């Protein structure tokens, strides 16, 4: 490892958990990754193994099958996935969607859904983005009309991570279409409900082992007991969770940048050109020095904000700074490092090529970086 950045935010139990996570991915994940890239999704059996090992929902209470840990346990899983380029969408399942059920659900809802979520038997998705509404959540058109003891849901969602694998989807819909942001609700929809249809797997630039699909809701009847929290308060709930989601994107970006720097240094020291190694050219060393400086800045920033999140929670502005700075740095630096690999850098079997295509979406999802700049600017 070439980073050598002292990190004092993790306790011994976090580092012991890291060893478990790393061994699991090296043993159960890496040998199958090529197959999953081709298939466009990870086997459900691998999710179940992750659940058995305690890698899913590390922050959820133990009484529901979770790990009973804190945010830094979730960060450990995110970092190890990023380091190995493992392509798993565990973070969305465990740290973004599951907390909606854990924090907003009734006791009956939690008992009904969370044990299978923690074991990997039920895979979660959040159906938020629509063909005509991405970062602008107020503009969603999917409706849920109350009819006695049921809601009738109609609409279409797109770019849904875990869309083809999901057993449960938290659907963001309008229960009061005239009220804008004040008319949004969160409703859990089981994948086997009549009228709920999974569309084609979308072909993406990167993240090829993560299934991303369209979802369609045609008169899907769901009992009112599937409403999460209060009706028409969904927008508030989504806004409360966004800082942690954006911080996790930053956590992933920091670890990915460090891993790619390590691999690039190893590569240029072994690759020969014009009678010397690529490392021997001053241009190579200077570019890698710049990248090291960027990686240290990103790591320092992200660790600082992880500590703040653990002690008091992050403000929207702080989360936006973490996501903006880390993902922009990752994009620039991975492009530079791909160049240092020459033609091999353009081959997808090389980790740097996969890091290059995977990194691009980090500036889009979780709220585009243009939205991050707007949030930061508003606080100036």
Image (tube, rainbow, N blue to C red):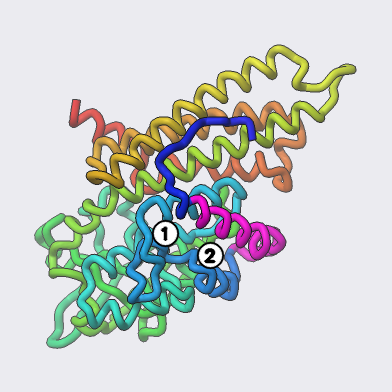
219 sits to left or right of 235: right
Q: Do residues under tags 2 and 1 come within 8 Å of each other at their CB atoms?
A: no
Which segment did they paint magenta? Answer: 15-40
Nearer to me, 59 or 291: 59
Q: Quadrant of the C terminus?
A: top left
Question: Which residue is identified by label 1?
Answer: 92
Q: Is residue 231 above or below residue 352?
A: below
Under tag 2, what secondary structure? strand
Q: Is residue 277 above or below residue 202?
A: above
260 sits to left or right of 131: right
Q: Main secondary structure of the magenta part?
A: helix
Q: Residue at x 64, y 35 (%)?
A: 1
Rendered location of residue 360, percent (x, y): 51, 41
Q: Residue furthest top?
A: 282
Q: Residues within 10 Å of mark 1 (few under 14, many from 20)?
A: some
Q: Residues within 10 Å of mark 2 (few under 14, many from 20)?
A: many
Under tag 1, what secondary structure? helix
């Amino acid at each position: 490892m070439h980073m050598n950045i002292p990190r004092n935010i993790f306790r011994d139990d976090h580092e012991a958990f890291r060893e478990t996570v790393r061994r699991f991915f090296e043993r159960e994940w890496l040998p199958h990754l090529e197959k999953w890239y081709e298939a466009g999704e990870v086997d459900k059996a691998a999710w179940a193994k992750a659940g058995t090992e305690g890698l899913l929902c590390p922050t959820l209470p133990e009484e529901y099958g979770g790990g009973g840990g804190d945010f830094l346990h979730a960060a450990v899983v995110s970092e190890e996935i990023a380091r190995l380029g493992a392509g798993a969408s565990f973070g969305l399942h465990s740290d973004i969607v599951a907390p909606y059920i854990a924090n907003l659900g009734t006791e009956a809802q939690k008992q009904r859904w969370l044990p299978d979520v923690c074991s990997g038997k039920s895979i979660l998705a959040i159906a938020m983005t629509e063909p005509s509404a991405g970062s602008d959540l107020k503009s969603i058109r999917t409706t849920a009309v109350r009819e006695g003891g049921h809601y009738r849901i109609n609409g279409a969602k797109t770019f849904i991570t875990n869309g083809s694998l999901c057993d449960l989807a938290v659907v963001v819909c309008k229960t009061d279409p005239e009220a804008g942001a004040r008319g949004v609700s969160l409703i859990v929809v089981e994948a086997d409900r009549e009228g709920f249809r999974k569309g084609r797997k979308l072909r993406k630039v990167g993240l090829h082992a993560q299934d991303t699909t369209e979802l369609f809701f045609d008169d899907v009847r769901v009992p009112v007991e599937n409403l999460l929290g209060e009706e028409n308060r969904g927008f508030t709930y989504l806004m409360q969770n966004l800082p942690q989601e954006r911080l996790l994107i930053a956590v992933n970006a920091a670890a990915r940048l460090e891993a790619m720097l390590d691999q690039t240094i190893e590569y240029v020291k072994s690759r020969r050109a014009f009678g010397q190694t690529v490392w021997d050219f001053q241009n190579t060393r200077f570019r890698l020095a710049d990248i090291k400086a960027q990686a240290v800045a990103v790591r320092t920033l992200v660790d600082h904000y992880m500590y703040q999140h653990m002690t008091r929670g992050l403000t929207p502005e702080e989360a936006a700074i973490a996501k903006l700075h880390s993902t922009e740095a990752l994009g620039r630096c991975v492009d530079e490092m791909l160049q240092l690999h020459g033609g091999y850098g353009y081959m997808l079997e090389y980790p740097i090529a996969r890091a290059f295509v995977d990194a691009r979406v980090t500036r889009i999802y979780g709220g585009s970086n243009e939205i991050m700049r707007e949030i930061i600017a508003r606080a100036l």
